[in-house]
Amino acid sequence: MTGASSQNVGPIILLGPPGAGKGTQAKRVSEYYRIPQISTGDILREQGQRGTELGIKAKDIMARGEFVPDELMYGMVADRLRQVDCERGFILDGFPRTPAQAGWLDAFLEHEFFDNVPRSKCLPVVIRIDVDYNLLLRRIAGRRSCPVCARIYNVYLQPPRVADTCDHDGSKLIARDDDREEVIRDRLQRYEVQTRPVAQYYERKARLSAVNGEMPVERVTEEIIRLVENSRREAVGS
Ligand code: AMP
């Protein structure tokens, strides 16, 4: 599946609880439209590995499954969105996570992003990926990744050929610090209390769509692309 690589796609925001498949879908949609995937969790983990000031500050907070403070998030996200590769659009995965972050993002896009010709002037398309709670638990508890090539596996749902070993390069698979059982329930609870209202924020602005995240991966991607295309057609028609 390939998409147009010259059209303005604008911002796409993927919402959904941990384990809903935001990262997987963001990557696929990013390849389709050739626009960057911006995962705030990935950026923070990378900063942690590089030992930057931000990474060090965020590391313990992340391991506990808590949210990194907004004043750290805003600078990081603004720096990333100002980069030239975001001009035609971008996919946000993991941001905004609170209504305050959603308000900040709207203001940023309005005052900085859209003002800055030739950047895209499309309003964000916001898509929530819905998955049943028990399936989320299995998806997160079973998640393992390769520290070398970043391929993702699941010990229950998509196991490697040899236990704990990457099919691609033979590295020993690892679990994320915050995918431990005792942290997972807290993260899901935090999603319900702090992030679900973000969907309501966009719903009030009539910008929210939802997809069934329990469908096969390819079907979910097709549905997301269909929603983005519909929204862009409406924007052109209005
Ligand atoms: P994720 O990879 O999206 O599950 O994010 C992993 C962790 O990074 C989260 O549990 C938070 O600690 C931190 N994080 C990522 N995005 C945000 C955000 N928008 N606001 C606050 N903390 C965040």
Image (spheres, rainbow, N blue to C red):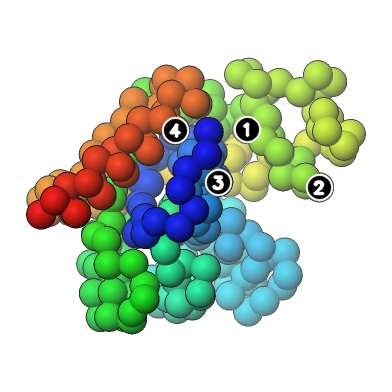
Query: SS class of the residue under badge 2?
Result: loop
State how far apart marks 4 and 3 are (Cα): 11 Å
The numbered mark at residue 221 is 4
Q: Are marks 1 and 2 in contact (CB under 8 Å)?
A: no
State how far apart marks 1 and 2 are (Cα): 16 Å
Q: Earlier in the sequence, mark 1 or mark 2?
A: 1
Q: Earlier in the sequence, mark 3 or mark 2?
A: 3
The numbered mark at residue 31 is 3
Q: Which residue is mark 1?
A: 143
State how far apart marks 3 and 2 are (Cα): 21 Å
Query: SS class of the residue under badge 4?
Result: helix
Q: Which residue is mark 2?
A: 148
Q: Amino acid at mark 2?
A: Val
State how far apart marks 3 and 1 are (Cα): 23 Å
Query: SS class of the residue under badge 3?
Result: helix
- Res. 167 visible in picture: yes
The residue that appears at 55% across and 46% down in the rendered structure is: 31
Q: Is residue 190 above or below residue 129?
A: below
Query: SS class of the residue under badge 1?
Result: strand
Closer mark to the observer between disc 1 and disc 2: 2
Closer mark to the observer between disc 4 and disc 2: 4
Q: Amino acid at mark 4?
A: Thr
Q: Position of residue 47 (x, y in %)?
A: 65, 68
Q: Amino acid at mark 3?
A: Glu
The residue that appears at 59% across and 40% down in the rendered structure is: 179
Whether residue 232 sits left or right of residue 139 in the image: it is: left
- Res. 92 visible in picture: no
Whether residue 234 sits left or right of residue 83 in the image: it is: left
